[in-house]
Image (cartoon, rainbow, N blue to C red):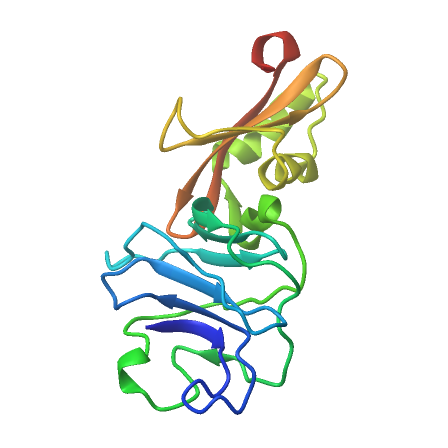
């Protein structure tokens, strides 16, 4: 079932095939992202997570000329390097929830919201495409730290989520702990969870590099 694609007139081959992002085999199947390069070769990566659980998920497919990667709820779900070169260009329309030809079996059986397509960007910062919300405690933490002479700006917290220098997804699972340099002696650690395709910042705090850097 197609989620979104620029797959051209894939029944007759009269319009360039560029990429497709789909549930490969139906609602109970994992995702497949398949770009085509300038030579017309197709690469593809198939994830492992099945999304027919009745809740919203944030899904992303990326291709950087070497790596084809899928993310589900901010976490990598599959990658490979079977395709290389520039993405094929052409006039194929972007189709959401189906294909150019009326092959009914390929219509998406579910809801799709907030489709975005970016030219460029990196796999590392794909998580910033998701909506980010701060809990009440996290909002208060700015003032608490300020009263102790520590000024942490919201942008710095977002930097840690977007471009972490370390990311711990194991020790406090299902929570994520993103870490970034704060000053010469400290790192900034941000604790968050992913909830229905949204990043929820729970708390953040500075810590000594000697304790947390590996």
Please tell me whether residue 67 is drawn above or below residue 96 in the rendered image.
above
Image check: 23 left or right of 168? left
| 177 or 213, nearer to the observer | 213
How far across and how far down the image is residue 165, in percent? Answer: 63, 29
How far across and how far down the image is residue 30, in percent? Answer: 31, 57
The part of the image, by quadrant, that contains residue 145 is top right
Residue visible at 30% across and 71% down in the picture: 110
Please tell me whether residue 205 is drawn above or below residue 111 in the rendered image.
above
How many numbered discs, if any? 0
Quadrant holding the N terminus: bottom left
| 55 or 41, nearer to the observer | 41
Residue visible at 62% across and 85% down in the picture: 91
Image check: 10 left or right of 50? right
Quadrant holding the C terminus: top right
Residue farthest to the right, as pictured? 184
| 112 or 35, nearer to the observer | 35
How far across and how far down the image is residue 37, in percent? Answer: 59, 68
How far across and how far down the image is residue 35, in percent? Answer: 52, 66
């Amino acid at each position: 079932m197609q989620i979104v694609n620029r797959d051209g007139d894939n029944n007759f081959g009269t319009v360039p095939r560029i990429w497709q992002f789909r549930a490969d085999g139906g609602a109970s199947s994992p995702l497949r992202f398949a770009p085509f390069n300038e030579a017309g070769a197709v690469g593809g990566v198939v994830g492992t997570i099945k999304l027919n659980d009745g809740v919203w998920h944030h899904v992303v497919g990326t291709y950087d000329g070497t790596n084809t990667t899928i993310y589900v709820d901010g976490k990598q779900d599959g990658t490979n390097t079977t395709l290389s070169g520039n993405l094929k260009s052409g006039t194929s329309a972007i189709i959401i929830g189906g294909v150019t030809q009326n092959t009914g079996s390929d219509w998406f059986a579910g809801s799709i919201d907030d489709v975005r397509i970016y030219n460029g960007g990196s796999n590392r910062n794909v998580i910033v495409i998701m909506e980010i919300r701060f809990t009440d405690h996290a909002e208060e933490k700015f003032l608490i730290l300020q009263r102790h002479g520590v000024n942490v700006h919201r942008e710095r917290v977002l930097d840690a989520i977007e471009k972490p220098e370390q990311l711990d997804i194991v020790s406090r699972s299902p929570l994520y702990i993103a870490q970034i340099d704060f000053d010469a002696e400290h790192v900034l650690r941000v604790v968050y969870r992913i909830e229905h395709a949204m990043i929820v910042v729970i708390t953040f705090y500075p810590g000594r590099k000697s304790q947390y850097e590996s």
